[in-house]
C-alpha cells in the first residue's frame, strides 16, 4: 500500500509525459492513456478495500517527519471519492475515443495527456495530507482544465474560458493568502498538525481562517455566490471535457471543504454553511429551470447539487457528513454520465438547444433510457443512487431538526425533476423539428459512445446496488472526519 | 510581523483587485501579476522575521530566515508565472478574435436576463 | 404481437394471486431483501389478504387491458413496443406497491408508478396537450411523493420501525405532521380535491392506460396508502378530519365535474375523483363497517370503471368521437357495447342485482352506524355523492346510447379484442353479485387486516326493506331525475380553473427562475469578480476581533520600509499607466524589482533571483504578446468605478487584518532547528531552500514543473489555433 498510494499520484503524471511524447502515434497514445486510467481506477478500488479492512494508509514521502515533509494520507473518505472519480474518468476516455469521429470532438493529441494530468491532480488533492500540496494539486487540476477548455481556441471557448480562468486564478491567489495566514498562525501546513493547532487559535482568527477557506474552496466548488464561472464555461467545451469537469472539478472543491472544515473543527460555521447550502441549491436549480439548452441546464444542476453536499457538511453531524460523502460518490459518475448523454444529443441534432430538438424517444429509445436513468437518479428518485443519497441527507436534517434546510432540499428536488422533465419534453418527446434527420456521426462511433455510456450507467447502478456497504463506509468515513484526533494520531505516529 | 511588509502586501492586493475587476484584458493580466507578488510576499512574511539567507553553513538556527516559506514561495512564483503567461496567451487570442481588449459578457446569460418577466 | 406477449406476466401473477386468495392457509408468502440496512432501506414484500385482493385487480385487469390494447392500437400502430414495455413496467411497479410491507419499499414503487404513468400519459407525445398533461400529472404526484418521503421519515422515526406489520399507533405533534403529509400524498395520487386537477388532463393518454391506471390501479394507490397507514396514524388529531375533508370535497366536486362535461372519458375521470373521495371518506372514518365498505368499493369500482373506460375507448375508436353530444344511435349499432355499459353503469349507480349495489349498501349502512357529527358528514358524503353518481351515470348512458334527433353516427367494424375484455368485466359485475359469498371471502380478510372490527361484516345480496335499502331507492330515483334533467345539457357551472392554475404556476416558477437567474448570472465578468471580492471582505471580518497590535512592528530594517513604499507606489503607477504598453511594462518591471529587493532584505536571495527572471519574461511577454492595447475605455459609470475602488481598498485592508490577526497569537512555531539539522544530515545540502525543494517537498516541485509544462502546452495550442483560424476570424 505504501507504494500504491504515491503511484496513484505520480503514475498518471509520468504517463502524461509518455502519452505526450507519443502524441503523433495515435494508438500508442490511447493505449497509454487507457491503461494508466484503468490502472489508477483499479488501484483506487484496491485502496478502498484495503483501507476499509485495515485502516488508513499514511505515506511519508522521502521519509520526512510530517512536521517537515509531505505526507499522503489515504483514509476511507479519500479512497471512496478517488475510486468514484477515477472510474468516471476512465469511462469518459473510452467515450472520447468514440466521439473523436464526430464533429464535436476535442483534439485527441492533448486530451489524453491532459486527462492524465487532471487525474494525477485529482488523486493528489484527495490523498494529500498537506495544505500546500493541496494547492499544488488544485493548480494541476486547474491548469489542465484551462487548457482542455480553451485549446481549440474557438471564440465562445475563449470568452467563457476567460471568466473561468480569471475567477479561478483569483481563488488560487486567495488560496495562497490563506496558506500564508495558516502558516503565520500555526507554523505548519500539515493538515494533521493543523487539526491540533487551528482549534487552539483565538476564536476570531480561527473563524476567519474557516471563512477564508470557505471562500477559496467554495469558489472551486461553485457555491453561492461564487459559482458564476461554472455555467458560462462548461457548456462551451467539447462534451468529453465538460463531462469530466462536471464530475470532478467542483467535487474536488467540496472534498476539500469537507476535509478542511471537519479537520479544523469548524462546527461553528455550521449555520453559515447551511445558509450557503440552501442558497446554492435554490439558485442552481432556478438557473437550470431558466435555461433552454441541455448542457446549460445540466451545468446549473451541478451547482444545485453542490448545495446538497454542503448541507451534509453544514449539519456537522455524523449522519449529515456521511450523507455528503455518499452524495459525492453518487454524484461524480451520475453527473458525468448526464453530460455524456447530453453530448450524444448534441451529436444527434448538431445542437443542444431544446427548441431545435424533439422526438428522440421514438427514434432512439436506448438514448432515452440512457438519459432517463441518471436523470431520475439526479432528481433523487428511487431506486437509484441519488435517492439513497438524498434520503440520507434529509434524514440527517430531520434528526438535526434543521427543518428549513430540509424543506428547501425537498422543494429543490421537485424543481430538479421539473427541469429534467423540461429536457425530456424538449428532446425526447414532441416532433423532430428537422425535415430530414441527418446522421452526424458514424454508426461505429455511436456504438462506442453508447456502450461507454451504457457501461458507466451500469457503474452508477452499481452504486445503487452497493448502497448498503457504501453507506456503512460513508458512515465510518464521517465518524473519523468528525473526530480528527484519530487522523492526527495516525499521521503523526 | 513586519508592518512594512503588511503595508506592501495590502497595497499590492488593493491595486491588483482594482485592476482585475475591470474590463480590460491587459489590466486583468497586470492585476494578477500584482496579486501574485502580494501572495508571495504574504507567504514570506508568514515565516517570521527577516534573517540571514538560509545557508546552513553560514548561519545559525536563531539568525536564519525561515526557509520553508521561501521554498513554498518559489513554487508559488513558478506556478503563478506559468498561469500568468497562459492568461496572456488567452488574452492575445481574445484580441485576435474580437480585435478588442475587453472582456465580453456571456451571450446566453444576457439573453436569459433580457427575457425575464417577473 | 408485443402487446399480446406482454399480457403473459400479469396473467401469471393473476393466477398466483388467485392461488393465494383461494388456497390460502397459513402464512402469507413474503420476501425480504436487504438494501441499505444503515438507512433501514429494504425490499420487503408480503402478499397478505389486502395485497392479494389488489394483485387480483392489478393483474387481472392488467391482462384484459393488454388484450384490449391490441384492439385499440390495431396491427399497424407505431410505438406499441415502447407502450407495452412501459405498461408492463407500470404493472410491475404497481404490484411492488401493493406487495410492499415496509414503508420504503412502498415509497420506491410509489415513485415508480408516478414515473411510468408520466410516460404512459404522454405516450402520444406529438400532441402538445398530452405532453402538458403528463408534466402536470408528474409534478403533482411527485410533489406528493416528496410529502410522502418526509411523512414516512417522521413516521418511521416515531414508530421505531419501517415494517407496516409492526407499526403501532403514533401520536403527538410529529405524528400529526406525518399524518398530514401522508394524506396529502394520498390525495395527490388518488386525485383528491384540490390535487385532482391532473386526472382529467391525463385522459390524453391512450384509453387502455385510462382503463388501467385511472380506474383500477394507480389512482387506488392513495386509497391503499390511507388503508395501510390508518392503523398507525388513525389516532392522530389530524387524520380523520383531514382525510374526511379531502374525501368529502372530492366526492362532490368530482361528481359535479362529471355532470359538467360532454366528453365521455372526462365524465368517467371526474366520476373517478368522486368515487375515490367516497373511499377515502370511509377509510378515514375508520370504523369496521366503513373500512369494510371501502374495500368492497375498491373492488366493485375497479370492475365497473375499467369496463366503462373500455367501452368509451371502443366508441372513440369506432365512431371517431366520444362526445356525448355528437353521438347518436349507438344503442342499436353497438348493442354489445351498450349492454356492457348499461350493466357496468348500473353497478356504478348502485342498482341491484350488481356488485356495485352491495358495496354502496354497505357504505350507507356504515354511515348509519356512526353517530354525531361524523354520521352526518359521512352520511352526507355517501348519500349526496351517490345521488350525483346516479345522475352522471344516467346522463352518460343516455348520452352514449339514448335517443337523439341527430342522424345516426357512422361506425367502423367491430374489434373483438376491444369488445371481449369489457364484456368480461361486465359479466364480472353480475357474477360478483351472484357469487357474493366468494366476494365476501375476498373482501373480509382484506378489511380485517386494516380494521379488525370488520370481521363481523359481510355483503348482503338482499338486505330486505331496511332503512339503508330505502335510502338506496331514494338515491336512485333522485339521481335519475337529476340525470334526466341535465341530459345533453352542459351544466352551467364555471369551468374548472385547477389545471390552468397548475400550468400557470409551473410557468410562473419558470419565469421566476429566469428572473432570478437574470439577476445573479448576468454574464459580466467584472461583476462576478466584484462579488467575489466582496465575499472575501465579509469572510475576513472575524479576523478583526483578534488582532494583537504588539505582534506588529514597523519594519525588519528601514530599507524594508522604503521598499514597501516603493512597491505600492509603483503598483499604483502601473495601474495608472496601464493604457500604454510601455508604461504598463515599466510599472510592472519596477514593481518586480522592488519586490525582489524586499526578498533580499528578508533573507531570500534565491527568491529574488527567480523573481527577477520571471518578471523579465512576463514583461517581455506583455510587450510582445499583446497586440495594441485599446485606449478606448468603456464608459464605466462613476458609481461603478467608485464601488471598485472601495472594494479594492477593503480587500487590501482585509488581507492586512488577516495577516495581523494570524501573527497575533500563533499556536505553533515552525521547527527551524530540526529542519536545519535534518536538512544538512539527511538532505545532504547546506542551501536549505534547495534541500526543501528537491527533497523534503519534492512532490510540490514535481507538481510545479507539470503545471508549467501544461501551461506551455496551452499557450502553444492557443497560438496554433490563432494561426490556423486566422482566416475564420477575418
Image (spheres, rainbow, N blue to C red):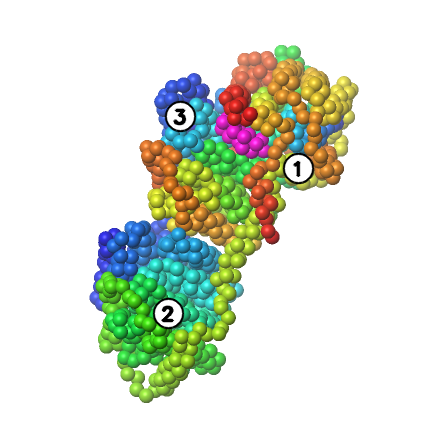
Which residue has dot 1 on it?
Answer: C530
Q: Residues within 10 Å of mark 2 (few under 14, many from 20)?
A: some
The spot of residue C626 in percent (x, y) is 62, 21
The spot of residue B5 in percent (x, y) is 72, 25
Q: Of all residues shown, which one is farthest toward the bottom?
A: C465
Give the quarter of the figure containing the C terminus of chain C. top right
Q: Chain of mark 3?
A: A
Q: Nearer the viewer, mark 2 or mark 3?
A: 2
Q: CA distance from mark 3 to mark 1?
A: 40 Å
Same subunit, labels 2 and 1: the answer reads yes
Q: Residues within 10 Å of mark 3 (few under 14, many from 20)?
A: many
Q: Chain of mark 1?
A: C
What is the chief secondary structure element of the magenta stretch? Answer: helix
The spot of residue A127 in percent (x, y) is 48, 31
Q: Secondary structure at mark 3?
A: helix
Same subunit, labels 3 and 1: the answer reads no
Q: Quadrant of residue C323?
A: bottom left
Q: Residue at x 72, y 26 (%)?
A: C575
Q: Secondary structure at mark 2?
A: loop
Part of the protein shown in magenta: A142-163
Q: Is residue C23 left or right of residue A411?
A: left
Q: Earlier in the sequence, mark 2 or mark 1?
A: 2
In magenta segment, residue A160 = yes
The image shows residue C491, relative to residue A458, as above or below, that is below
Q: Residue at x 57, y 38 (%)?
A: B107
The spot of residue C512 in percent (x, y) is 57, 52
The residue lying toward the viewer, choosing from A64 and B24, is: B24
Q: Secondary structure at mark 1?
A: helix
The residue lying toward the viewer, choosing from C353 and A17, is: C353
Q: Which mark is residue C326?
A: 2
Marks 3 and 1 close (CB-CB < 8 Å)? no
Amino acid at each position: 500500500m505504501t507504494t500504491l498510494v504515491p503511484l496513484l499520484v505520480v503514475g498518471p503524471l509520468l504517463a502524461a509525459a509518455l502519452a505526450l511524447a507519443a502524441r503523433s502515434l495515435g494508438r500508442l497514445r490511447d493505449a497509454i492513456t487507457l491503461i494508466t486510467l484503468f490502472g489508477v481506477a483499479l488501484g483506487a478500488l484496491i485502496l478502498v478495500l484495503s483501507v476499509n479492512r485495515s485502516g488508513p494508509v499514511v505515506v511519508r514521502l522521502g521519509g520526512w517527519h510530517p512536521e517537515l515533509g509531505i505526507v499522503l494520507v489515504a483514509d476511507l473518505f479519500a479512497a471512496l471519492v478517488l475510486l468514484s472519480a477515477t472510474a468516471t474518468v476512465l469511462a469518459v476516455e473510452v467515450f472520447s475515443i468514440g466521439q473523436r469521429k464526430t464533429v464535436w470532438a476535442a483534439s485527441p493529441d492533448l486530451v489524453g495527456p491532459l486527462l492524465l494530468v487532471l487525474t494525477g491532480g485529482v488523486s493528489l488533492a484527495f490523498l494529500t495530507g498537506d495544505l500546500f500540496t493541496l494547492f499544488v494539486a488544485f493548480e494541476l487540476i486547474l491548469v489542465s482544465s484551462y487548457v482542455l477548455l480553451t485549446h481549440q481556441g474557438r471564440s465562445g471557448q475563449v470568452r467563457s474560458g476567460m471568466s473561468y480562468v480569471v475567477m479561478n486564478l483569483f481563488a488560487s491567489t486567495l488560496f495562497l493568502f490563506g496558506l500564508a495566514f495558516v502558516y503565520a498562525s500555526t507554523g505548519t501546513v500539515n493538515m494533521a498538525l493543523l487539526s491540533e493547532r487551528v482549534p487552539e487559535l483565538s476564536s476570531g482568527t480561527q473563524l476567519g481562517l474557516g471563512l477564508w477557506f470557505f471562500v477559496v474552496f467554495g469558489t472551486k466548488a461553485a457555491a453561492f455566490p461564487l459559482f458564476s464561472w461554472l455555467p458560462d464555461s462548461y457548456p462551451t467545451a467539447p462534451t468529453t471535457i465538460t463531462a469530466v469537469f462536471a464530475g470532478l472539478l467542483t467535487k474536488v472543491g467540496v472534498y476539500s471543504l469537507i476535509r478542511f472544515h471537519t479537520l479544523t473543527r469548524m462546527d461553528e460555521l455550521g449555520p453559515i454553511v447551511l445558509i450557503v447550502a440552501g442558497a446554492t441549491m435554490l439558485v442552481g436549480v432556478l438557473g437550470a429551470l431558466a435555461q433552454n439548452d441541455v448542457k446549460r441546464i445540466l451545468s446549473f444542476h451541478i451547482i444545485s447539487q453542490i448545495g446538497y453536499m454542503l448541507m451534509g457538511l453544514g449539519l456537522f453531524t455524523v449522519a449529515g457528513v456521511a450523507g455528503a460523502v455518499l452524495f459525492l460518490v453518487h454524484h461524480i459518475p451520475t453527473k458525468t454520465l448526464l453530460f455524456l448523454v447530453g453530448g450524444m444529443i448534441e451529436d444527434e441534432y448538431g445542437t443542444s438547444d431544446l427548441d431545435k430538438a424533439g422526438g428522440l424517444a421514438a427514434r432512439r429509445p436506448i438514448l432515452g433510457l440512457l438519459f432517463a436513468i441518471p436523470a431520475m437518479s439526479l432528481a433523487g428518485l428511487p431506486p437509484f443512487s441519488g435517492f439513497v443519497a438524498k434520503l440520507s441527507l434529509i434524514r440527517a436534517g430531520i434528526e438535526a431538526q434543521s427543518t428549513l434546510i430540509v424543506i428547501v432540499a425537498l422543494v429543490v428536488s421537485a424543481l430538479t425533476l421539473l427541469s429534467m422533465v423540461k429536457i425530456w419534453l424538449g428532446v425526447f418527446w414532441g416532433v423532430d423539428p428537422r425535415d430530414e434527420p441527418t446522421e452526424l456521426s458514424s454508426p461505429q462511433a455511436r456504438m462506442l459512445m453508447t456502450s461507454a455510456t451504457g457501461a458507466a450507467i451500469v457503474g452508477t447502478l452499481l452504486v445503487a446496488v452497493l448502497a448498503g456497504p457504501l453507506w456503512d463506509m460513508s458512515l465510518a468515513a464521517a465518524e473519523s472526519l468528525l473526530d480528527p484526533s484519530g487522523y492526527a494520531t495516525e499521521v503523526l505516529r | 510581523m513586519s508592518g512594512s511588509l503588511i503595508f506592501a502586501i495590502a497595497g499590492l492586493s488593493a491595486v491588483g483587485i482594482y485592476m482585475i475587476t475591470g474590463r480590460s484584458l491587459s489590466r486583468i493580466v497586470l492585476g494578477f501579476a500584482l496579486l501574485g507578488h502580494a501572495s508571495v510576499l504574504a507567504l514570506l512574511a508568514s515565516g517570521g522575521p527577516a534573517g540571514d539567507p538560509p545557508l546552513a553553513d553560514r548561519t545559525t538556527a536563531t539568525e536564519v530566515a525561515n526557509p520553508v516559506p521561501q521554498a513554498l514561495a518559489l513554487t508559488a512564483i513558478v506556478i503563478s508565472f506559468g498561469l500568468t503567461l497562459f492568461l496572456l496567451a488567452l488574452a492575445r487570442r481574445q484580441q485576435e478574435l474580437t480585435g478588442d481588449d475587453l472582456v465580453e459578457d456571456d451571450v446566453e446569460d444576457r439573453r436569459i436576463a433580457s427575457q425575464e418577466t417577473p | 404481437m408485443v402487446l399480446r406477449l406482454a399480457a403473459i406476466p400479469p396473467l401469471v401473477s393473476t393466477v398466483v394471486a388467485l392461488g393465494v386468495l383461494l388456497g390460502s392457509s397459513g402464512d402469507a408468502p413474503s420476501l425480504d431483501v436487504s438494501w441499505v440496512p444503515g438507512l433501514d432501506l429494504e425490499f420487503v414484500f408480503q402478499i397478505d389478504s389486502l395485497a392479494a385482493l389488489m394483485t387480483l385487480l392489478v393483474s387481472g385487469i392488467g391482462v384484459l387491458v393488454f388484450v384490449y390494447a391490441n384492439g385499440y392500437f390495431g396491427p399497424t400502430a407505431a410505438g406499441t413496443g415502447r407502450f407495452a414495455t412501459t405498461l408492463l413496467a407500470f404493472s410491475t411497479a404497481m404490484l411492488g406497491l401493493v406487495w410492499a410491507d415496509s414503508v420504503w419499499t412502498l415509497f420506491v414503487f410509489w415513485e415508480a408508478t408516478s414515473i411510468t404513468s408520466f410516460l404512459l400519459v404522454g405516450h402520444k407525445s406529438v400532441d402538445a396537450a398530452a405532453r402538458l398533461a403528463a408534466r402536470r400529472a408528474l409534478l403533482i404526484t411527485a410533489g406528493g411523493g416528496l410529502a410522502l418521503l418526509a411523512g414516512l421519515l417522521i413516521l418511521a422515526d416515531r414508530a421505531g420501525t419501517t415494517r407496516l406489520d409492526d407499526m403501532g399507533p403514533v401520536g403527538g405533534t410529529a405524528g400529526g405532521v406525518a399524518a398530514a403529509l401522508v394524506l396529502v400524498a394520498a390525495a395527490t395520487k388518488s386525485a383528491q380535491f384540490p390535487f385532482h386537477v391532473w386526472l382529467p388532463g391525463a385522459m390524453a393518454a391512450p384509453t387502455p392506460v385510462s382503463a388501467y391506471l385511472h380506474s383500477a390501479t394507480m389512482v387506488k394507490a392513495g386509497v391503499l396508502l390511507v388503508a395501510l397507514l390508518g392503523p398507525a396514524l388513525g389516532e392522530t388529531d389530524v387524520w380523520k378530519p383531514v382525510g374526511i375533508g379531502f374525501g368529502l370535497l372530492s366526492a362532490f366536486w368530482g361528481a359535479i365535474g362529471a355532470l359538467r362535461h360532454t366528453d365521455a372519458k372526462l365524465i368517467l375521470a371526474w366520476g373517478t375523483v368522486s368515487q375515490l373521495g367516497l373511499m377515502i371518506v370511509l377509510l378515514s372514518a375508520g370504523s369496521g363497517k366503513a373500512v369494510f365498505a371501502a374495500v368492497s368499493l375498491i373492488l366493485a369500482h375497479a370492475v365497473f370503471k375499467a369496463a366503462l373506460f373500455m367501452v368509451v375507448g371502443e366508441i372513440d375508436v369506432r365512431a371517431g368521437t366520444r362526445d356525448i353530444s355528437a353521438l347518436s344511435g349507438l344503442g342499436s349499432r353497438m348493442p354489445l357495447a351498450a349492454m356492457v355499459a348499461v350493466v357496468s353503469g348500473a353497478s356504478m349507480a348502485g342498482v341491484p342485482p350488481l356488485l356495485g349495489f352491495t358495496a354502496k349498501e354497505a357504505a350507507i349502512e356504515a354511515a348509519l352506524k356512526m353517530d354525531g357529527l361524523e354520521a352526518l358528514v359521512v352520511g352526507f358524503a355517501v348519500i349526496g355523492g351517490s345521488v350525483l353518481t346516479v345522475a352522471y351515470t344516467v346522463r352518460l348512458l343516455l348520452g352514449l346510447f339514448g335517443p337523439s334527433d341527430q342522424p345516426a353516427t357512422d361506425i367502423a367494424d367491430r374489434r373483438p379484442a376491444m369488445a371481449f375484455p369489457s364484456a368480461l368485466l361486465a359479466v364480472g359485475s353480475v357474477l360478483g353479485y351472484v357469487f357474493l359469498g366468494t366476494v365476501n371471502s375476498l373482501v373480509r380478510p382484506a378489511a380485517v387486516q386494516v380494521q379488525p372490527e370488520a370481521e363481523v361484516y359481510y355483503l348482503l345480496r338482499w338486505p330486505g326493506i331496511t332503512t339503508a335499502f330505502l335510502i338506496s331507492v331514494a338515491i336512485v330515483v333522485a339521481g335519475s331525475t337529476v340525470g334526466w334533467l341535465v341530459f345533453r345539457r352542459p351544466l352551467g357551472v364555471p369551468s374548472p380553473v385547477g389545471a390552468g392554475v397548475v400550468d400557470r404556476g409551473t410557468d410562473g416558477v419558470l419565469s421566476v427562475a429566469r428572473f432570478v437567474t437574470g439577476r445573479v448570472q448576468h454574464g459580466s465578468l467584472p461583476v462576478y469578480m466584484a462579488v467575489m471580492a466582496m465575499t472575501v471582505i465579509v469572510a475576513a471580518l472575524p479576523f478583526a476581533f483578534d488582532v494583537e497590535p504588539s505582534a506588529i512592528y514597523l519594519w525588519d530594517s528601514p530599507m524594508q520600509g522604503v521598499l514597501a513604499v516603493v512597491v505600492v507606489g509603483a503598483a499604483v503607477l502601473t495601474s495608472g499607466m496601464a493604457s500604454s504598453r510601455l508604461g504598463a511594462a515599466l510599472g510592472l518591471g519596477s514593481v518586480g524589482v522592488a519586490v525582489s529587493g524586499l526578498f533580499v532584505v528578508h533573507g531570500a536571495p534565491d527568491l529574488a533571483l527567480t523573481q527577477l527572471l520571471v518578471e523579465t519574461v512576463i514583461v517581455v511577454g506583455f510587450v510582445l504578446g499583446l497586440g495594441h492595447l485599446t485606449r478606448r475605455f468603456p464608459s464605466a459609470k462613476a458609481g461603478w468605478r467608485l464601488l471598485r475602488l472601495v472594494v479594492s481598498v477593503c480587500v487590501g485592508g482585509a488581507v492586512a487584518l488577516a495577516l495581523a490577526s494570524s501573527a497575533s497569537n500563533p499556536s505553533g512555531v515552525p521547527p527551524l532547528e530540526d529542519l536545519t539539522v535534518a536538512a544538512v544530515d539527511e538532505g545532504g545540502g547546506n542551501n536549505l531552500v534547495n534541500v526543501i525543494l528537491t527533497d523534503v517537498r519534492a512532490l510540490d516541485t514535481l507538481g510545479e514543473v507539470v503545471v508549467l509544462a501544461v501551461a506551455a502546452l496551452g499557450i502553444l495550442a492557443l497560438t496554433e489555433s490563432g494561426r490556423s483560424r486566422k482566416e475564420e476570424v477575418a
